[in-house]
Amino acid sequence: MKQLLILFFFIISFGIEVAHAITIGVPELIILLIVGFIAIAGVTGFVLLCLHLIKKTKTTKNEK
């Protein structure tokens, strides 16, 4: 739940940055989009890694 709240905050702040970048120009908008996609991929990868490790820990406890 905490990750969803952080992701929601990130999406809102990213939207504000995109709105600001539209007034700046197209190259800055492209840079912000690339950085945003990398950040979203990083957060998603971290969440999926945590879920994988939690599942792996549960199966290891059941084997003992």
Image: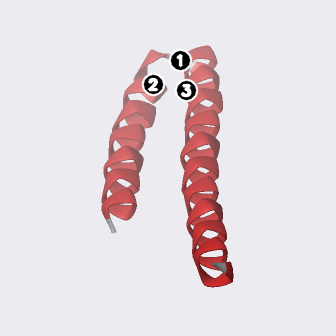
Q: Residue at x 62, y 83 (%)?
A: 62
Q: Front-most of 45 and 49?
A: 49
On the image, the x and y values in percent for residue 55 come to: 62, 72
Check contact, mark 3 vs mark 1: CB within 8 A. no
Task: Assign a secondary structure to mark 3.
Answer: helix
Q: Residue at x 57, y 45 (%)?
A: 40
Q: Which residue is mark 1?
A: 25
On the image, the x and y values in percent for residue 14 come to: 42, 39
Q: Front-most of 51 and 7?
A: 51
On the image, the x and y values in percent for residue 51 come to: 58, 65
Task: Assign a secondary structure to mark 1.
Answer: loop
Q: Residue at x 34, y 38 (%)?
A: 16
Task: Assign a secondary structure to mark 2.
Answer: helix
Check contact, mark 3 vs mark 2: CB within 8 A. yes
Residue 15: assigned label: none
Q: Which residue is mark 3?
A: 32
In the image, residue 1 sits, relative to residue 8, either above or below, namely below
Q: Amino acid at mark 3?
A: Leu
On the image, the x and y values in percent for residue 19 come to: 40, 35
| Quarter location, residue 31 | top right
Q: Amino acid at mark 1?
A: Gly
Q: Is residue 57 left or right of residue 11?
A: right
Q: Amino acid at mark 2?
A: Ala
Q: Which residue is mark 2?
A: 21
Q: Nearer the viewer, mark 3 or mark 1?
A: 3
Check contact, mark 2 vs mark 1: CB within 8 A. yes
For label 1, the crowd category at 10 Å Cα-Cα, with few meaning under 14, some 14 to 19 and many 20 or more, is few
| Quarter location, residue 48 | bottom right
